[in-house]
Image (cartoon, rainbow, N blue to C red):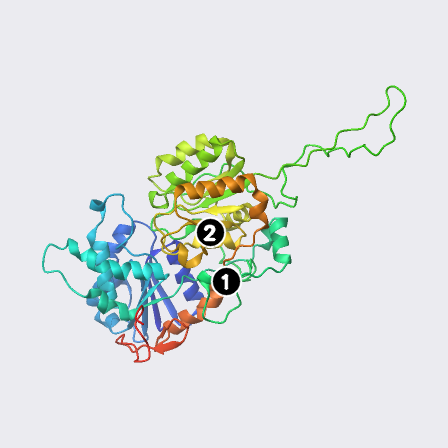
């Protein structure tokens, strides 16, 4: 085996990436630890792998996530230090939000800086992730009382490049309601200027069938409710069954067929004859279905989300909500409060046990919301767009890199105003074709780049997609410019 995949936190997006690489790249071997006790994995996993990765002359490349202290591992195992070392950042600890600055543990960010210094190639899942890390290095080390290291960002930047997280999008056409299928049948193609790729791939229909690959058997972690987190899993509660596929014209079901107007019948000329009926009222559209598919933790700002929904409720607006995602030991109090306050509006509440159940709910939803205070990529939002949802995201973090301006909000009031309008006119959302090309974030598009960067010689990628060879010591060839240098 020539490619050594090392994952200290084998769960969520970390697991999905390792599984994709193992399945699709030849000569890979995986060493991992379960996705539990994230803080202890970051502190001590190097010792575990030092003892459990056997020596082998066939290893050529080592890829690890940034949870691992790579500097410790290669110091403990000089044989692994001789490999070409690739570090992948799902998230970075220099800007990871904490509720109070005193709570930030310096050691986690420090470990990541050390890992970058010993790595030959450093990959980030987004430009936001890369730039927020590199630009935060100087201020991060200001907490050191004296004899601070200098110019570390300049040492690290030439090794860095963006390689988006690859998503395996399943075919969800069997779960889509009629209005979403109709949009596809019209053959609408859109282009997302914020997510244009440089690889010449086809762009932009909402392309729910962009990837025909089936999900891994039993791999529930691939769904958005299982991704981009750093903790162990606990199953939440589902309070309603998964919706059946909606084949009606987006209207509330009627208990009985409405009678046809009788105005065209002859007028009766004798007592007791049938009188003309009043014209029937058109059925009301189904209430707007809002989805929130994120971890139940403070960094996803559930407080803002539920405050917004309570304003809609107080305004007498019609809507339904599905609160998906995983729960953990310490669930913010707002979830219990909101479950009571929004009881009449809830369709689904909590973690769904299978990926198909999760996808069915996303396919039935109209709008997907992010209120995150932390996001380095956002798999759940892209999966929801793949299922035909209209996204509303903060105009911050990674979102402007992926979503055009029309899907971004700057303030809580803007979010509430957008949702208020959609509640009044859900048909506007249901007719809209989302201008985001999810296909450019698929394994089918990104897989070759991963194969190249994990080849024995290794390649780096410039902004136009061209390749430049990287030597085993990590120095780019003269034709390759460092990331962010023009």
Q: Is residue 13 shown left or right of residue 46?
A: right
Among the two numbered marks 2 and 1 on one chain, the one whose residue lies closer to the N terminus: 2
Residue 8 in the image: x percent, y percent?
31, 58
In the displayed image of the protein, which residue is found farthest to the right?
270
- Where disc 1 sits, the SS reads helix
Q: Which residue is mark 1?
A: 439
**In the image, which is nearer the foreground, mark 2 or mark 1?**
2
Quadrant for the C terminus, please.
bottom left
Quadrant for the N terminus, please.
bottom left
Q: Is residue 263 above or below residue 58?
A: above
Q: Which residue is mark 2?
A: 407
Residue 168 in the image: x percent, y percent?
48, 60
Q: Is residue 467 shown left or right of residue 172?
A: left
**Label 2 Cα neighbours within 10 Å, binned few <14 / some 14-19 / many ≥20:** some
Q: Is residue 463 shown left or right of residue 92?
A: right
Q: What residue do we see at 61% from left, 54% from top?
A: 183
Residue 462 in the image: x percent, y percent?
37, 73
Q: Label 2 vs label 1: CA separation? A: 18 Å
Q: What residue do we see at 68% from left, 36% from top?
A: 282
**Relative depth, front residue between 486 and 310:** 486
Instruction: Report which quarter residue 88 is drawn in.
Output: bottom left
Residue 431 in the image: x percent, y percent?
59, 50
Number of marks drawn:
2
**Label 1 Cα neighbours within 10 Å, binned few <14 / some 14-19 / many ≥20:** many
Asked if marks 2 and 1 touch (Cβ < 8 Å), the reply is no
Q: Is residue 22 visible?
A: yes
Q: What residue do we see at 85% from left, 32% from top?
A: 265
In the displayed image of the protein, which residue is found farthest to the top?
271
Q: Is residue 221 visible?
A: no
């Amino acid at each position: 085996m020539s490619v050594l995949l090392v994952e200290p936190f084998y769960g969520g997006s970390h697991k999905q990436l390792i599984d994709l690489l193992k399945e699709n790249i030849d000569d890979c071997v995986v060493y991992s630890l379960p996705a539990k006790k994230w803080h202890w994995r970051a502190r001590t996993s190097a010792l575990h792998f030092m003892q459990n990765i056997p020596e082998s002359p066939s290893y050529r490349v080592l890829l690890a996530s940034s949870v691992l202290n790579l500097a410790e591992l290669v110091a403990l195992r000089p044989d692994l230090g001789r490999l070409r070392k690739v570090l992948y950042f799902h998230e970075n600890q220099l800007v990871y939000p904490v509720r109070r600055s005193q709570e930030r543990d310096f050691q986690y960010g420090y470990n990541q800086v050390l890992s970058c210094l010993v790595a030959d190639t450093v990959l980030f899942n987004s430009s936001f992730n890369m730039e927020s890390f590199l630009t935060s290095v100087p201020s991060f080390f200001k907490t050191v009382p004296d004899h601070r290291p200098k110019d570390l960002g300049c040492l690290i930047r030439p090794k860095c490049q963006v390689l988006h997280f690859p998503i395996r999008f399943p075919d969800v056409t069997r779960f889509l309601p009629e209005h979403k299928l109709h949009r596809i049948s019209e053959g609408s193609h859109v282009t997302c200027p914020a997510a244009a790729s440089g690889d010449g791939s086809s762009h932009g229909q909402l392309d729910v069938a962009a990837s025909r690959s089936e999900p891994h058997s039993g791999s529930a972690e691939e769904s958005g409710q299982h991704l981009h987190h750093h903790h162990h899993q606990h199953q939440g509660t589902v309070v309603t069954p998964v919706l059946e596929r909606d084949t009606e014209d987006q209207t509330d079901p009627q208990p009985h067929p409405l009678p046809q107007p009788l105005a065209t019948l002859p007028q009766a000329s004798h007592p007791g004859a049938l009188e003309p009926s009043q014209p029937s009222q058109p059925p009301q559209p189904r209430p707007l279905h809002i989805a929130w598919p994120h971890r139940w933790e403070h960094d996803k700002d559930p407080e803002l989300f539920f405050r917004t929904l309570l304003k809609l409720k107080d305004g007498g607006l019609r809507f339904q909500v599905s609160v998906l995602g995983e729960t953990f030991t310490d669930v913010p109090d707002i979830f219990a409060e909101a479950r009571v306050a929004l009881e009449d509006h809830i369709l689904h509440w909590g973690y769904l046990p299978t990926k198909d159940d999760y996808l069915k709910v996303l396919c039935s939803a109209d709008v997907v919301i992010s209120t995150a205070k932390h996001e380095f990529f956002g798999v759940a939002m892209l999966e929801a767009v793949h299922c035909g949802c209209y996204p509303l995201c903060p105009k911050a973090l990674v979102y402007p890199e992926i979503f055009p301006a029309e899907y971004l909000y700057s303030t809580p009031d803007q979010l509430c105003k957008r949702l208020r309008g959609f509640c009044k006119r859900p048909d506007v959302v249901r007719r809209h074709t989302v201008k985001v090309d999810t296909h450019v974030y698929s394994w089918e598009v990104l897989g070759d780049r991963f194969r190249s960067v994990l080849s024995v010689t290794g390649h780096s990628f410039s902004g136009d997609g061209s390749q430049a060879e990287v030597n085993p010591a990590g120095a780019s060839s003269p034709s390759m410019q460092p990331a962010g240098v023009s």
